[in-house]
Image (tube, rainbow, N blue to C red):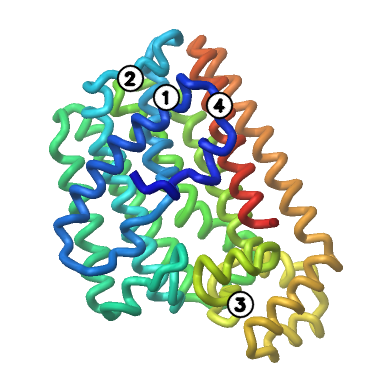
Amino acid sequence: MNNNIWKNYIYTYVSENNLLNFYTRFLETFEAEWNKLISNYHFEDLCQLNNGNRLRPMLVFWGYLLNKDNDEVFNISDQDLQLIMNPCIMIESIHKMSLLVDDWIDGDIARHGSTTFHVLYGADTAVLLAMNIMLTGFLKLSRIHEKVYKTTIPLALQISYDMTLGALNEISSKKSVFDIAKVKEIINLETSSIIRNGLIIGFTAGGGENKDIIDLLDDIGYCCGYIFQALNDLEPFGNVDGLMHHKGALTTDILKNRKNIVIAYIHAWANESEIEKISTLSNSEFVSKYVISLIDKYHIKEHMLEEVSNLQLRIQNRIAKIEKKTGHYNWCHHFNNFIDITIAASKKRALC
């Protein structure tokens, strides 16, 4: 198993043996299946496919676990892992498709400190690999129980539709990336959709059918998606060194007219001369320094962190409602901790 996976997530915070064993068993099983899948691609370097925190497949698994009895949440059988693994692989495949395409569109030269695929092999090969890895995931999903396939395939298609539509909306209109409401719509499509529908895929794959629970999982996924994207958008202005190591350059998305909720807030709150000055700067370092000064002036970071805190409370409220409807105290308690841990790790990455 890749030792870097979840280094800043669960293993930093969890000490209980049963939880460590639970996470380790899932991740080791997932890594074995994922490595088997990508071994079919004969390239010397598969940076974007090799690395990752596996957050999205883990969320699928959490959705699945909601179907287990309260006292059996972490009593995971081989049958459980076998049933849920293909949906988990499918979710990661869609995510990797988006990374391959996004890195190419953004012109990013590195990810996790390694050269990006399109730089090594060209944009045409990157797009073909992106399409193939996503379709491979769909084929994996088709090799599960027919009833599970029928309930999960529409959700998987919805994720793919939402993410590609969000990307099209982002690159087709330069004005939309400076509008707060439009940026939040794009975040909902590009980031929240895979989390929302991933949770629901896991739940329905395990036999869950309760519409109220599905609606609550949907809202939890929406909140998580916004939180993770907002913190990611803060990273170029709060953790410059970390971003330089991760992507090999100071990419702020400003000079590329790509969406960033921080920049949308600046366009909403700054005066005309300040916005005009941003447009005259052509160097990423100068842009970043000036934007940081505007973030401080208009208390944008504080506002966004307050948004994050409010959404965390909303997530806790939805989890409490799930507990009330299901009586699954253990799932709700540990899932809430899982969300808190991942948000804490995202904050650390964005602000350290």
- Identify the residue under disc 1: 211
- Foreground label between 4 and 3: 4
Residue 254 is marked as 3
For marks 4 and 1, give the CA distance: 35 Å
Residue at horizontal 74%, vertical 74%? Answer: 291
- Foreground label between 3 and 1: 3
Whichever of callouts 3 and 2 sits on the residue coming sooner in the sequence is 2
Q: Position of 342 compared to 286: left or right?
A: left
Please tell me whether mark 3 sits on a helix, a strand or a loop.
Answer: loop
Q: Is residue 110 above or below residue 36?
A: below
**Residue 42 position within the rendered picture, expressed as x and y whole percent measured from the top left:** 16, 65
Image quadrant occupied by the N terminus: top left
Residue 290 is marked as none
Whichever of callouts 2 and 1 sits on the residue coming sooner in the sequence is 2
- Identify the residue under disc 2: 76
Circle 4: residue type: Ser
Residue 254 visible, this angle: yes
Whichever of callouts 3 and 1 sits on the residue coming sooner in the sequence is 1
Task: Report the front residue among 210 and 320.
Answer: 320
The image quarter in which residue 200 lies: top left
Residue at horizontal 54%, vertical 35%? Answer: 220
**Residue 211 position within the rendered picture, expressed as x and y whole percent measured from the top left:** 42, 24
